[in-house]
Image (cartoon, rainbow, N blue to C red):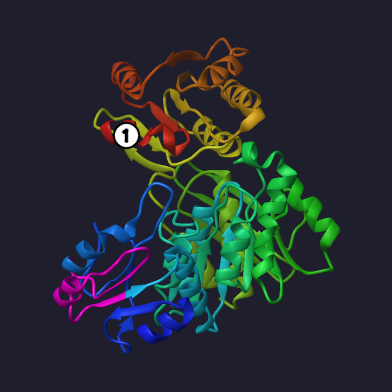
Amino acid sequence: MQKMKVKEILKITQGTLVIGDLELDCENFSKDTRTIQKGDIYIGIKGDKFDGSKFWKQALDLGAQAVIIQGIEILEDEKEKYAGKTIILVNNTLEALYKMAEYKRSLYNIPVIAITGSVGKTSTKDIIASVLTTKYKTLKTEGNNNNNIGLPLTILKLRDHEVLVVEMGMNHFGEISLLTKIAKPTLAVITNIGTSHIGNLGSRENILKAKLEILEGMDKPRIIINNDNDLLHKWYEENKGKIEIHTYGIENQSELNAENIELQEENSKFTAVSKEKKIKIYVPVGGKHFIYNALCGAEVGKILGLSDDQIKEGIANFELTKKRMDIRQLENGAILINDSYNASYESMKASLEYLANHTGTRKIAVLGDMLELGKYVVELHKEVGEEVAKNNIDILICAGENSNYIIEGAKNNPQVEKYLLKTNDEILQKLHEILKKGDVVLVKASNAMKFYEICQKL
């Protein structure tokens, strides 16, 4: 286990020791006084609207052993009160966090797998980690902590781990560049290039450029891509032979392909086919998009030297992060598909296809706004409505500033019963009115729409 001491943190961050022990081992880091544990090292992150350094005393009172803060004057009586604790002052706590994580990463000569993409990052991360856990002690990003704070804090959790699996999210250029230079991955994954954040980046081609920043932190670029994605396939054709690229897919001939696919409501089966062999794989979640995730997990396992049985076991036992295709039966016998965490056109399309193939009596889609679409907002919401119509969804319920365009897009199928409502409470009331035993209802929107509250109340 590689530990950092206070004296190393001071050197890395060019910080000042106000009081404390230079030899103190710093293992567990926290940025939130609400969840702080005894012995933690508290980092007072300063954001645009919040200054965590102001809560340094609260952190120490709650059991933190040390605090790393900025812009705070420590008075003599405060030094006396907290004698036995450690206080470090730095110029910028966020920069200090980056430097500590980068240093911690440098202490470990282990595989680091970094995953990015427009959709499917978290579920792909979960399935890759599940596969690797069958052979290695694996640390992974928890939930969707994939930003400039979550990723460094994940790296700081490294103990005696043999593999690190991290997720990298972004909204703008430069964000993945920062993350990859901290994590220094040995293997990168891009799941797809879609329309998420297209309003910020202007085009799918620019989204591809932003995702490819992941290569900047790698000493030797080595990447796995979804070869069925049009832009990734084009990029592969232009760059194969220049760097190490591994591919997986269903439609296009790839290093690893899925054949003999059997899609069920709650699981799937397929055969993973490579030049060397064929492996029959069971996926404990329904939906074609999880076939892609499983293929990616199998490809990572293959590259890192896992056996066929280990790969199969890891995929069969993986568990989804909550609020992503979380399926449960309601008290009245209806089935709820809670996919409320986030939404893009591509993920809406995949979820609607899954809903359409469900054996429920009536298919009900509760859909809300997709955010950060810029000039594409009308077009992409209408295209979601067209997917509703094409998949013969029985009932469409919408709310949100742009959800009227979803309704409009679904109008070419008059068989779809449509409701445009104003609030989440109205949606909940409508569902209570219409839901029957045997119905299956999909709830999906961008996280800011808070559709997860609908699921909680159902």
Q: Does the magenta stretch include residue 280?
A: no
Q: What element carries label 1?
A: helix
Tell me what residue is drawn at x 77 percent, y 55 percent.
253
Q: Position of residue 11 (x, y in %)?
A: 46, 83
- The magenta stretch spans residue 67: yes
Residue 256: image x %, image y %? 69, 61
* Residue at position x 49%, y 32% in the image: 355
Residue 179, picture quadrant: bottom right
Considering the image in quadrants, where does the N terminus appear?
bottom left
Q: Classify residue 423 by image quadrant.
A: top left
Magenta residues (range): 62-87
80 and 306: which one is in front?
80
Q: How many marks?
A: 1
Dot 1 crowding, Cα within 10 Å, few <14, some 14–19, many 20+: few
Q: What residue type is labelled 1?
A: Glu
- The answer to whether residue 226 is visible is yes
Which residue is identified by label 1? Answer: 453
Lateral position of residue 367 relative to residue 425, left or right: right
Q: Position of residue 308 (x, y in %)?
A: 57, 72
For the point 42% across and 32% down, which residue is it?
449
Left or right position of 19 against 120: left
| Up-down relation of residue 292 to residue 437 (above or below) | below
**Where, quadrant-wise, is the C terminus in this rendering?**
top left
Relative to 117, is 187 above or below?
below
Q: Nearer the viewer, residue 239 or 276?
A: 239
Judge by depth and name the residue closer to the eye, 160 or 47. Answer: 47
**Above or below — where is 292 with respect to 214?**
above
Q: Residue at x 47, y 73 (%)?
A: 101
Q: Can residue 295 be seen in this view?
A: no
Residue 411's x, y, as percent?
Answer: 59, 12
Position of 359 relative to 57 (above/below)? above
Q: Which residue lies furthest to the top in this view?
A: 414
